[in-house]
Amino acid sequence: MNYQGENYSPNTQFSIFPPAVKHLIIVNLLVFVALTNPMLQRYLMEFGALWPVGSGLFAPWQLITYMFLHGGFGHIIFNLFALWIFGQGIENFWGTKRFAIYYFLTGIGAALIHMWIGGGGAPTIGASGAVYGILLAFGMMFPDRYIMLLIPPIPIKAKYFVAIFGGIELLSGLMRPDSGIAHFAHLGGMVVGFILIKYWGLKGESSRY
């Protein structure tokens, strides 16, 4: 079924900070600053982090709020940098409304899959599930664009880049289930993203020429 209609029209002008990406970055940074206050940190973690269903602290809104909490500087920098690098291309290609819907659905889907497969007893935080969904979308929409790896510094096509990251997450989730990293949430974001792109009938860059 194809939903490429007026409600999801692409942005008319390219922007390096399109609206959804820009506002997601701003909100995440504001929440991160709020977490530096011990009182606010306790409140935000108790009510905003994604707690296991059996913990007595779980609430439905946590499927969204957990995406705006991060555990450290490296955690938030990685997620927001990836959101900006890959998200700007997707939002400009799809339009802001579709991008925002996709972002939150992949984040929610990542949370549900993480909880189903084995979230453990610790709360889950971070936008990584939605960011991995964006990464998957970039690989599907722009499969032949090159991404520069840092180590080693070589260019690689987006479709292979995404496949490598997906494989790493799968192996890590199977071999290191107690690593403290929600590998299956990352995979969940990619799986939900794939389903959404296929359901919406979206076509990549190469298929439009």
Image (cartoon, helix red, strand yellow):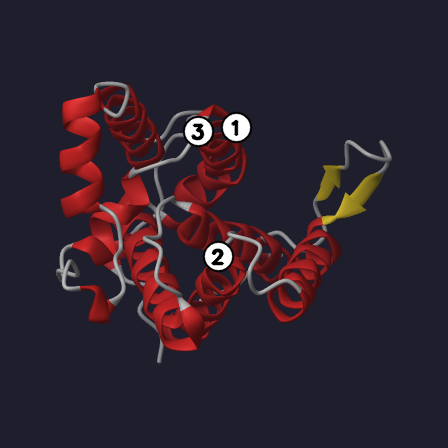
Residue in the picture at 71% in, 52% down: 161
User: Image height check: is 43 above or below 204?
Assistant: above
Residue of label 2: 182
Residue 133 horizontal side relative to residue 147, left or right: left
**What is the number of the mark on residue 74?**
1
Q: Kindly tell me whether residue 201 is visible in this rendering.
A: no
Residue in the picture at 22% in, 41% down: 45
- Marks 1 and 2, how far apart at CA: 16 Å
Considering the numbered disc 3 on the image, is that residue within a helix, a strand or a loop?
A: loop
Q: Kindly tell me whether residue 160 is visible in this rendering.
A: yes
Residue in the picture at 17% in, 61% down: 58
Residue in the picture at 28% in, 39% down: 68
Say which amino acid is labelled 2.
Answer: Ala
**Which badge, 2 or 3, is on the more N-terminal residue?**
3
**What is the number of the mark on residue 22?**
none
Q: Are marks 1 and 3 in contact (CB under 8 Å)?
A: yes
Considering the numbered disc 1 on the image, is that residue within a helix, a strand or a loop?
A: helix
Residue 181 horizontal side relative to residue 49, left or right: right
Residue of label 3: 72
Q: Quadrant of the N terminus?
A: bottom left
* Badge 2: residue crowd in 10 Å (few <14, some 14–19, many ≥20): many
Q: Nearer the viewer, residue 191 or 58?
A: 58
- Residue 34 is situated, as x and y percent measured from the top left of the image, at 22, 22
